[in-house]
Image: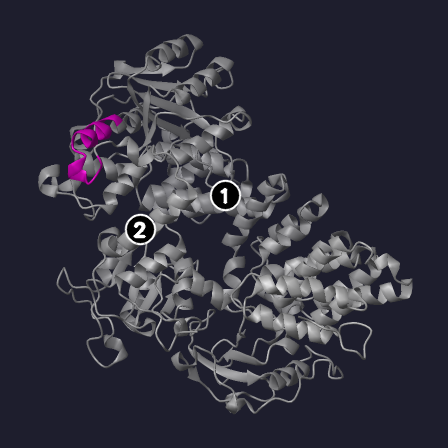
Amino acid sequence: MIHSTPESNGLDPTVLREQLFELWRSNDLQTFHLEAQEGFSELNDPLEAILTILECSPAKQKARGHTLGAHILKEFQSWLKEHPQVMLTSLPEQQATALKHRALFLLTNTQTVVVEGLINIYQLTTLDPATLRLHVVNLLALKCYKEATVLGIKLNLQNELNVEEVCMPLIFQDKLSLAESFVAGHTHLEQQLVSLLDSWCHPNFSLTDMMSERFPHLSRSKHSLAHIQPKMLTKHVFQLAEKFNIDQGLCPNALHKRRLDSLRFLMFKRFLDKSMTDENFSDHVQTVVADDLELQIQLVEMLPKYCGLEKAAQWSLRYSLPRHRLPWGVWDAQQSLSPELQHASNSTHTEEWMPSEAHCQKFYQVPLTKDKVQHVDTLKALQSCRDTLLKGGGVVGVDMEWQPTFGCSSTQQVALIQLATFDTVFLLDLCANGICQHPETITFIRSFLCERNVLKVGYGMAGDLKCLMSTWPQFVEEPLKIEGMLDLLNVHRKIQCGKVNSAQCGPKDMVVGEDSAEKGLSRLVQQVLGKALDKSEQMSNWEKRPLRVSQIRYAVTDAYCLLDVYSVLSANATNFGLPSDLHSISLRQPEKNGDAKQKDKKSKMKKHISSKEECQGAQWVSPPCSDTEKGLLCGKKPPEDSPPAPLAPQQLRVVCDNMLQGLGRYLRCLGVDVVMLENNDDHRVAAKLAQAEYRVILTCGQPYQTLRSQVAEGRCLSLDCSEKARDQAVRVLRHFNVRPTPCDIFSRCQACNSDQYVALPRQDMIRMLKQKGFLQASDTSLTPPKEEPFEDVELPRYGPRCYWASVSDLDPVTLSFPGGAPIQLHTVPPTLVPRVQHYFVCTRCGKVFWEGSHFGRVLSMFKDVLHVTDEGTE
């Protein structure tokens, strides 16, 4: 029970704060609520007292949602509803203004719930806009960019602030989403942000020079600049242009960069990967290059490197490029071309429906003649197709094709829909005149997809349905209720996770997990039917008419093979590790939340058992085979029924491919020694690092086939790209039997992977901030109380897992470590200093850390794999 002192006219706010602090620390929120409500009623001036309490409340969070201040403010807002007579307007104007300014100062570096509460209680939006703007500008000057932006949004100051001054430092600090929030809803600001990012995509623009000139205090390491490289910037520009509904014409630099990247990709597919036909290459090049003279010239400059001068000469003639812009040798090659080659466009030749014998031996073939393929390009043909497919009781293979855009457009519309029965394949041509948007076509598609008596078999239908929605917005306005759909992608995943009895399943090619360059549907067809699909026409120009015979054959095959795969799997479900009812895999009813959680717990238990089969090509890695660090992972296989000996996180050394950076961050967070490739690094760099530093490679997708051959057995692990990074991390830890403890969390620098820190007391941090100008030398408000010598202060929980350097290693003038890295003082908010006693600085990169709420979140996220001992118990 709280009592006011006799000497005062009301309860001392300091007493109330101490009482509430003890209850909050013990997590007794029910008593906290009662004491708070009673205490507020005993305060002499509640509005002023609450500010006094908040100003002195600790900011430390206990791995819970809110700070003490947030809890107090929440209770106070509840109390105000019961006491409407307590309001700011009842105070004298001078006193009310003074309280507003105190509340304004508190807005910095607080949780969103506190910011919103203070703004509402103290009516901060009624302050003079010039005063509010000055406060935000001062925060920007103090390099508190995040705090300034949040306040600018909450106080509706977007139109009063400079977009570049607010958004540029946020982008450099990988906070583009916050910059998006700042401009959202203000059309002219949205366009300014997109135009700013687009200007950075210009080939002659130098980000490092601009940062050195305008933001010299911000980090310019490879890690900090990775997210603003031209490739990533181009991606951001297109995403924002789509989100804000901005014409791509306002993004000329990003559009040019995306088309140039598409051109390089086409060169790779045609001449190196050899997975694209010459006809498809020609079609796509003309679409990508269009009438852009610079791209036409760059095309002609690329071609000699890939296929010689003759092709370059032909394309230069096609675009009538001026002689002075041609690469060396192309003009002479033009003169030596025969008249036929000079005027040749796309070569046309008659194709037979039946491919060559070599093709038939290598690839799966449809057992149908050409007359069994029905082109649906008229309303009469549509009616015949409808009558055949909607009879009920049948099985229909469904596939769709659309024009590749290579990222130059976010919307892709279906050009062709293939509907296959066992004796006929219908090709619904949506590019035919008057077919696509005709009411009968839309009605047929809706009826077909909603007919539960017709089993529709597809593969990866999510992508098809997304393009279907782009083609017919009516299906978004009036959503489809899809019935009778079996997605073989779910079945395929089930097969990949199970064990296959290869002796009973047929050909050797069926065995799941065997090395194969095939993927997706082609891999499933190879596993089940023995031969892969020919995917050379996959990236065709599906909007160009007439379709070539090879395109038609590809479209028919992609739909019909689904029927053959379904038939074999239905007849031999148990041999493929599947339930007898295939429909139960993808058509099961949605579970209630409670059932889903229970099932998720059970599945997590099973994952540990089946992790060896689920990680393609993975081998158990043995425990340390010598006393040296180089021998930590020697790659031998223990007996099949024997898991590896437990490893500490520090004993596992890995290199993560650039497709698994999220996984790398989580593993590093748990103390694993992780090197991550940059976005522009070649995959082969991982193999070089693994060989030089005795690391295990973590990768996914096709690079696995190349990387595994360059390292010892068991030193390359392939993971499922579709899994979340957190689940991938759990899988890796269980696969290698790594036993992290709470003491391992954050034992490595999250920015550079170092495990060596320097510990700084608050008084040293204040001195350094003042030395570098981040605090005013005359500012005495941040002077902390007298503290114990730092040597007597206990190190953080991860102290035993780290190496601790001496503060004497710091250069007293530059505040840099012997390796040259300066302390990143600009990342320490000045308003944080009074509330944090100790700081921990990475000696390799200079990043500054302090105890906060991240530990609790990580602890909660990985509680099912953390090994809690007496050492790690809290």
Q: Amino acid at mark 1?
A: Arg
Residue 220 % position (x, y)? 55, 69
Q: Position of residue 128 (x, y in %)?
A: 85, 59
Residue at 48 percent of width and 13 percent of height: 440
Tell me: residue 165, above or below residue 873: above
Identify the element where label 1 is drawn.
helix
Q: What residue range appears in magenta?
A: 563-579
Residue 567 among magenta residues: yes
C-alpha distance separating marks 1 and 2: 47 Å
Horizontal relation, residue 175 to residue 84: left or right = left
| Element class at badge 2 | helix
Q: Quadrant of the C terminus?
A: bottom left
Q: Amino acid at mark 2?
A: Lys
Does residue 48 appear in this view?
yes
Residue found at the far left of this picture: 503
According to the picture, the residue beneath numbered tag 2 turns out to be 602
Residue at the image point whose x is 57% and y is 75% from the top: 824
Residue 343 belongs to magenta span: no
Within 10 angstroms of label 1, few (less than 14), some, or many (20 or more) residues?
many
Residue 756 - label: none
**Which residue is identified by label 1?**
259
- State left or right for residue 68 relative to residue 99: left
Which quadrant of the view contains residue 457?
top left
